């Protein structure tokens, strides 16, 4: 009997609070580089890997800047961050930026 009561209580709580659980998504100003495949965070920097390169936002996604200097293949599918090193997995292999994505 206790299990039925607990189950009913959980269901009641879910139904009565479900309107407060809705995500509040807002569209950002880009990046406009085709499909976004991956994101990485390094300090205050947010990186987005797209079909046409890497984009950087320093203000939580409000503005984006392309940072493809020295990137031999611009199709970026994965990121990894280690300290100030940013690794980008591209269609042509792995690329490393030792200065937090500047080049």
Image (tube, rainbow, N blue to C red):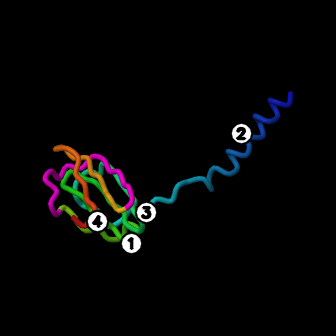
Q: Residue at x 79, y 36 (%)?
A: 6
Residue numbers of the magenta segment: 69-83
Q: Position of residue 13 (x, y in %)?
A: 73, 46
Q: Residue at x 18, y 61 (%)?
A: 68
Residue corresponding to mark 2: 11
Looking at the rendered structure, the secondary structure element under dot 4 is loop
In the image, taking residue 53 as reference, residue 23 lies left or right, namely: right
In the image, taking residue 8 as reference, residue 29 lies left or right, namely: left
Residue 45 is a magenta residue:
no
Label 4 neighbourhood size at 10 Å, few (<14), some (14-19), many (20+)? few
Residue 78 is a magenta residue:
yes
Label located before the other in sequence (3 or 4): 3
Q: CA distance from mark 1 to mark 2?
A: 40 Å
Q: Position of residue 90 (x, y in %)?
A: 22, 47
Do labels 3 and 1 touch, CB within 8 Å? no
Q: Nearer the viewer, residue 98 or 27?
A: 98
In which quadrant of the rendered view does residue 69 lie?
A: bottom left
Residue corresponding to mark 1: 59
Q: Quadrant of the N terminus?
A: top right
Q: Nearer the viewer, residue 4 or 74?
A: 74
Q: Residue at x 30, y 47 (%)?
A: 78
Q: Position of residue 97 (x, y in %)?
A: 25, 59
Q: CA distance from mark 3 to mark 4?
A: 30 Å
Q: CA distance from mark 4 to mark 1?
A: 18 Å
Q: CA distance from mark 2 to mark 3?
A: 29 Å
Q: Quadrant of the C terminus?
A: bottom left
Q: How many marks?
A: 4
Q: Is residue 23 above or below residue 60?
A: above
Residue corresponding to mark 4: 99
Residue corresponding to mark 3: 26
Q: Nearer the viewer, residue 15 or 34?
A: 34
């Amino acid at each position: 009997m206790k299990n039925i009561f607990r189950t009913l209580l959980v269901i009641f709580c879910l139904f009565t609070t479900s309107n407060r659980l809705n995500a509040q998504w807002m569209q950002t100003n880009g990046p406009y580089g085709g499909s976004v495949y991956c994101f990485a965070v390094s300090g205050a920097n947010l990186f987005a890997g797209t079909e046409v390169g890497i984009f950087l936002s320093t203000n939580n996604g409000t503005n984006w800047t392309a940072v493809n200097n020295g990137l031999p293949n611009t199709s970026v599918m994965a990121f990894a961050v280690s300290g100030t090193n940013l690794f980008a997995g591209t269609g042509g292999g792995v690329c490393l930026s030792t200065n937090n994505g500047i080049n």
